[in-house]
């Protein structure tokens, strides 16, 4: 369990935006433009936009500053990796809800943020609002469904079966969100979501795509390290033997996902 001191103190502020959208970048000149365009095109303007850059050496910062608005803040400094940068974003954030949008990812359309805002207000500020995710290629077109579908009823037990909701489509009340545990290199987002669900009193589904996730290749080494790390996290929160048994049942799902990824790579 993470110490209570890791959780964010909520400071009442009537002027605070409803959302803090956080994008972490590092040498992302090829992908960040589509994310900036998606965020800036949202019809709902109840947000601040934090771009946390890891001291990029390409044109990332130049692209981010182009079309910069008053609701955007850019911070650029060396960091200890993506989760350290995300922690910086959380600590700088002022919004009631956190949305993480990686460079290359997008909201599904220009009305998505308004839909999320309406859902929050209609449900008395739930701990988590979540939805589906489309996997898209470089041209922005859908190439596949996500390998896991967001469940109708999301609980802490749901994550015993893996990352059942894509991180980008997992919108979290900031005051129940802790910081990412930096001892995890690959799956700190998964462990973070579990801790959020431990503190959430209500989780509300929007049963449609909220975000478009850019399909990317993963090296075999990183994939295996990520799987081992996730297994340790699952064992800690859900027990070793139940986790081992579930992983045996995961084998067909894992093989199906690898086949889909190979088909995608062959097409591109």
Image (spheres, rainbow, N blue to C red):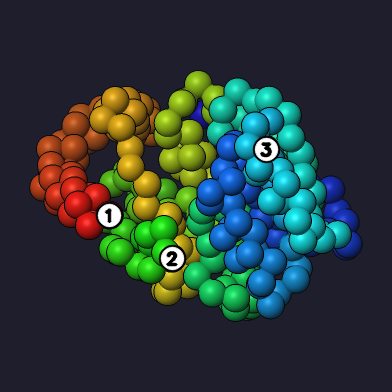
The residue sitting at 66% across, 72% down in the picture is 42
Residue 133, numbered label: none
Mark 3 surroundings within 10 Å by alpha-carbon count, few (fewer than 14), some (14 through 19), many (20 or more)? many
First along the sequence among labels 1 and 2: 2
Q: In which quarter of the image is residue 133?
A: bottom left
Q: In the rendered view of the protein, which quadrant contains the C terminus?
A: bottom left
Helix, strand or loop at label 1? It is loop
Q: Is residue 124 left or right of residue 195?
A: right
Residue 204 visible (yes or no): no
Q: Distance between the residues labelled 3 and 2?
A: 23 Å
Task: Give residue 53's mark.
Answer: 3
Q: Position of residue 152 (x, y in %)?
A: 36, 68
Query: Is the residue marked by circle 1 packed among few (<14), some (14-19), or many (20+) residues within 10 Å?
Result: few
24 on left or right of 70:
left
Name which of mark 3 and mark 1 comes first in the sequence.
Answer: 3
Q: Which of marks 3 and 1 is in front?
A: 1
Residue 84, x across and y down, in percent? 61, 30
Per the rendering, the mark at residue 140 is: 2
Determine if residue 84 is in view. yes
Camera-side mark, 1 or 2: 1
Give above or below for 247 relative to 150: above
The Cα atoms of the two marked residues, 3 and 1, are separated by 29 Å
Q: Is mark 2 on a helix, strand or loop?
A: loop
**Foreground residue, 190 or 79?**
79
Closer to the camera in the image, 102 or 67: 67
Which residue is rendered at x = 60% and y = 56% of the image?
33
Q: Residue at 59% across / 51% down in the picture?
A: 32
Residue 97 in picture, x, y percent from top left: 67, 57
The answer to whether residue 185 is above or below residue 43 is above
Give the residue at mark 1: 268
Contact (CB < 8 A) between labels 3 and 1?
no
Residue placed most toward the observer, 218 or 183:
218
């Amino acid at each position: 369990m993470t110490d209570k001191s890791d959780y964010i103190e909520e400071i009442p502020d009537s002027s605070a935006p409803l959302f803090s959208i956080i994008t972490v970048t590092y040498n992302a000149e090829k992908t960040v433009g589509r994310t900036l365009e998606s965020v800036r095109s949202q019809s709902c303007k109840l947000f601040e936009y934090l771009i946390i850059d890891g001291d990029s050496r390409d044109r990332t910062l130049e692209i981010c500053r182009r079309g910069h608005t008053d609701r955007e803040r850019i911070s650029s400094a060396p960091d200890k990796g993506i989760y350290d940068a995300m922690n910086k974003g959380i600590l700088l954030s002022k919004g009631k809800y956190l949305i993480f949008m990686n460079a290359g990812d997008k909201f599904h359309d220009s009305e998505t943020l308004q839909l999320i805002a309406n859902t929050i207000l209609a449900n008395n500020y739930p701990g988590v609002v979540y939805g589906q995710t489309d996997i898209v290629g470089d041209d922005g077109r859908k190439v596949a469904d996500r390998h896991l579908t967001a469940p109708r009823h999301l609980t802490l037990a749901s994550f015993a079966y893996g990352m059942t909701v894509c991180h980008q489509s997992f919108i979290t009340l900031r005051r129940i969100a802790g910081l990412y545990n930096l001892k995890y290199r690959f799956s700190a987002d998964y462990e973070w979501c579990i801790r959020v669900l431990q503190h959430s009193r209500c989780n509300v589904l929007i049963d449609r795509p909220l975000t478009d996730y850019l399909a990317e290749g993963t090296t075999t080494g990183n994939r295996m390290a990520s799987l081992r790390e996730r297994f340790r996290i699952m064992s800690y929160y859900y027990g070793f033997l139940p986790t081992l048994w579930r992983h045996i049942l995961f084998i067909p799902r894992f093989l199906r996902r690898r086949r889909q990824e190979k088909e995608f790579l062959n097409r591109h």
